[in-house]
Amino acid sequence: MSNRTLTEATRSAVLDTAHLGDIHGAMGTIRHHDVGARNGWGARLRTLAAILGPGLIVMIGDNDAGAFSTYAQAGQNYGTALMWTLLLLIPVLYVNQEMVLRLGAVTGVGHARLILQRFGRFWGAFSAIDLFILNGLTIVTEFIGINLALGYLGVPRVWGILVAAGIVIAAASTGSFRRFERFSLALCFFSLLLVPVFLMVHPPADQIAHGLFVPHFPAGSKLSDVMLLVIAIVGTTVAPWQLFFQQSYIIDKRITPRFIPYEKADLVIGIAIVVIGAVAMMAFTAAAFQGTAGFGNFTDAGAVATGLEAHAGRAAGVMFALALLDASIIGAAAVSLSTAYALGDVFAVNHSLHRKPTEAWGFYVVYAGLIAVAAVLVLLGSDALLGLLTNAVQTLAGVLLPSATVFLLLLCNDKAVLGPWVNGRWLNLFTGAVIWVLVMLSIILTAATVFPAISGETILAVLGGGTALGVVGFAGLTLVRRRPALADGIASVPRATWRMPPLSELPAPRLTFGTRLWMAVLRGYLVAAVLLVAYKVVQVAIGG
């Protein structure tokens, strides 16, 4: 590290000096002190190529084993009837991930550390612990996906899982950020295997258009089951680990505020690919099972590959299984990395892919340990136990997502943290409405887990009434509250060069009485909901 960069580190909030320096992206390099204008499309495209990565990886990593299962279930059980939910999630995906990419580029500090610093030890510990547990279970589901794909392809189960685990661990352990990103972008490219499967199955275009642009529920289906699947689609598409991963990955890639527009473009490309993949899965699964005994009787992604083979030939089944294997590997790597980054933030230890394992052993032990434990659990676990873990992941993700989004919104309105990059009024309005909807979905999912007989009418009443109340209340508060001006020292600095000062220099956060009240309510709900879900999981496990 140069003397100039070292001097900058003493005035920066970064927790690991490896997070400062040149950008070594998979497809290009940008020098740390390169502040030249990007004039012309050639220069802009070269810059975008160097920046490309965080948005693509976090989005395509979200189309993981759990997503394959959820989207395939929607298509196999209900045709294209639920496809419209994907379009509604596009602005939610963009707004959430745009806020974390802004936080990462401006602050240089990970999500978990900011929560700890600005909201206290309880929330800092809660965010780290729940992320660790939820991510650990999520990685197990990734290896379940690997197991299903290998089973269909006829690869020996034990050796296949061990090799997959070794590849995921080795990819991040070379001490080269660029090598890991190239590995990840190669996996992103292979996710496009879903496109030829779509072309082979050739689902009717009119059904896809109707499913996408005409919101409706499948006729003759049990409303409560449909609503729970809709909630599962939301949970698998907007997952808590994404927030922690992209913020930390942007920091590790050394992206600064002046490159935020390019990172937004990266995010848009990632969202486009993930939505195309989800639409393709719903569409070709619906077409492959329509009119067969399997329609309405989803079991797992392995059976989907078999159904595709029966409908469109062996090649279609093989490519779907390879896409599932690819998605599970990139999901396992991204989720493990988000956990290792978060714990590195909380304990302020070295946590960078630029460092060799000997220089950041705690970071790599967490990363590799999660992968190893998940692989062993899948090798030793019964099908019933693994199915139970999969359900627990979906439920816990739905329960914990609102809290993660609440803290994201609060941080993006903290002027000490983001300075001139804080949210605008209308972004707050939209994000507040989204949070309230997520809270309602979380409550419904928790209630349905504990009380399986809940009716569809009850679900709609809770969702509709609660959402309307929350949107009206938040809109009123946002519109009447005056937006305080930025401090002179902040307002005078150009946005492109403003970065958060060291954490020790930040003033204490100013939380209103209303904010503290809602945080207390949220704390109580989360504790109660997690305990109820844990009780239900244990009850099912012992056959109660």
Image (cartoon, helix red, strand yellow):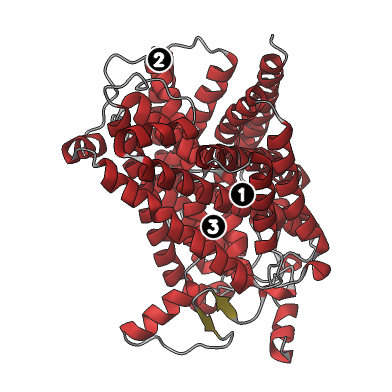
User: Mark number for residue 236?
Assistant: none
Name the secondary structure under disc 3: helix
Name the secondary structure under disc 1: helix
Is 471 or 115 nearer to us in this picture? 115
User: Mark number for residue 332?
Assistant: 1
Tell me if mark 3 has few (under 14), some (14-19) or many (20+) residues whose alpha carbon lies within 10 angstroms of its own: many
Q: Above or below — where is 492 with respect to 189?
A: below
Tell me if mark 1 has few (under 14), some (14-19) or many (20+) residues whose alpha carbon lies within 10 angstroms of its own: many
Q: Above or below — where is 516 with respect to 22?
A: above
Mark 3 = which residue? 100
Q: Amino acid at mark 2?
A: Gly
Q: Earlier in the sequence, mark 3 or mark 1?
A: 3
Asked if disc 1 and disc 2 are in contact, CB closer than 8 Å, the reply is no
Residue at image coords 44%, 75%: 49
- Distance from the alpha carbon under mark 1 to that under mark 2: 34 Å
Q: Using residue 266 as the reference point, say whether residue 381 is left or right of it.
A: right
Instruction: Give how far across and how far down residue 444 sits, in percent.
Output: 50, 23
Instruction: Give how far across and how far down residue 29 sits, in percent.
Output: 53, 82
Tell me if mark 2 has few (under 14), some (14-19) or many (20+) residues whose alpha carbon lies within 10 angstroms of its own: some
Asked if disc 3 and disc 1 are in contact, CB closer than 8 Å, the reply is no
- Distance from the alpha carbon under mark 2 to that under mark 3: 35 Å
- Distance from the alpha carbon under mark 3 to that under mark 1: 21 Å
Instruction: Give how far across and how far down residue 122 sits, in percent.
Output: 76, 42
Q: Above or below — where is 227 with respect to 46?
A: above
Residue at image coords 74%, 67%: 15
Mark 2 = which residue? 456
Name the secondary structure under disc 2: helix
Is 14 or 203 nearer to us in this picture? 203
Q: Amino acid at mark 3?
A: Val
Look at the image and tell me whether residue 437 can be seen.
no
